[in-house]
Amino acid sequence: MRTLDVERLAAGDYALIKPLLVALHLGEQVHYSDHPQLPREEIERHLAQVPSAFRGENVIYVVRDEVDQVVGFCWIVLYDPGTGLEGEVAELYVAEGHRGRGIGEMLVRQATRLFAERHVTLAYVWTRSDNQAAVKLYTAAGFEPNRQLVMIWYPIESSNHL
């Protein structure tokens, strides 16, 4: 049996994680009733190219299974807003049949190692508070709940409120 290792995805190998990214988006959208629920085809179309929302230096780590299939990935974005290098775990996903094998822990550990190597001044990750597996994973890696109040603004669909 092959040992699971974390490797950095080569630039241009986005297609290797695209199926997992689609699965992540499909699975997560059901938790947000205030957002439109998109069909698989639309998500696949939206993710046909590398998402442009990840501005900065993109680093993607992957874990492959015994048959060399990518079964988990961690997408990290590094950027400097003018106050020092910051990092975000933008996406983390492990395929359903491969969960519980320590793959998520391996990927998050590699992310925090990168943050330390690059002298990141602040790193963060977004997750739902009811996603207990993710909260436990990130807490074990040293992430803490945010001490700031985060407020959001959504555009109102109708323009007649102006």
Image (cartoon, helix red, strand yellow):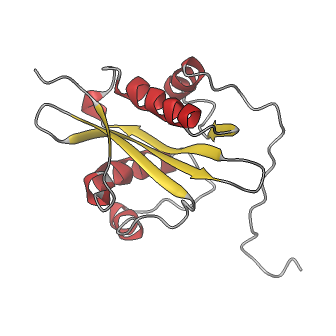
**As rendered, which of 114 and 134 lies closer to the eye?**
114
**x and y, in percent, of residue 81 in the image:** 73, 56
Residue drawn at x 49%, y 24% is: 133
**x and y, in percent, of residue 159 in the image:** 79, 81
Residue drawn at x 76%, y 56% is: 82
**As rendered, which of 15 and 156 lies closer to the eye?**
15
**As rendered, which of 57 and 14 lies closer to the eye?**
57
Q: Along the horizontal axis of the image, is 65 left or right of 33?
A: left
**x and y, in percent, of residue 144 in the image:** 69, 25
Q: Is residue 78 above or below residue 1?
A: below
Q: Along the horizontal axis of the image, is 159 left or right of 15?
A: right
Residue farthest right in this picture: 162
Q: Along the horizontal axis of the image, is 122 left or right of 99?
A: right
So how many labels did they put on this image?
0
Q: Along the horizontal axis of the image, is 118 left or right of 51?
A: right
Q: Is residue 108 above or below residue 26?
A: above
**x and y, in percent, of residue 109 in the image:** 46, 26
Q: Quadrant of residue 11?
A: bottom left
Q: Quadrant of the C terminus?
A: bottom right
Residue farthest top in this picture: 140
Q: Is residue 71 above or below residue 38?
A: above
Q: Quadrant of the N terminus?
A: top left
**As rendered, which of 144 and 34 lies closer to the eye?**
144
Residue drawn at x 83%, y 36% is: 148
Residue drawn at x 56%, y 26% is: 138
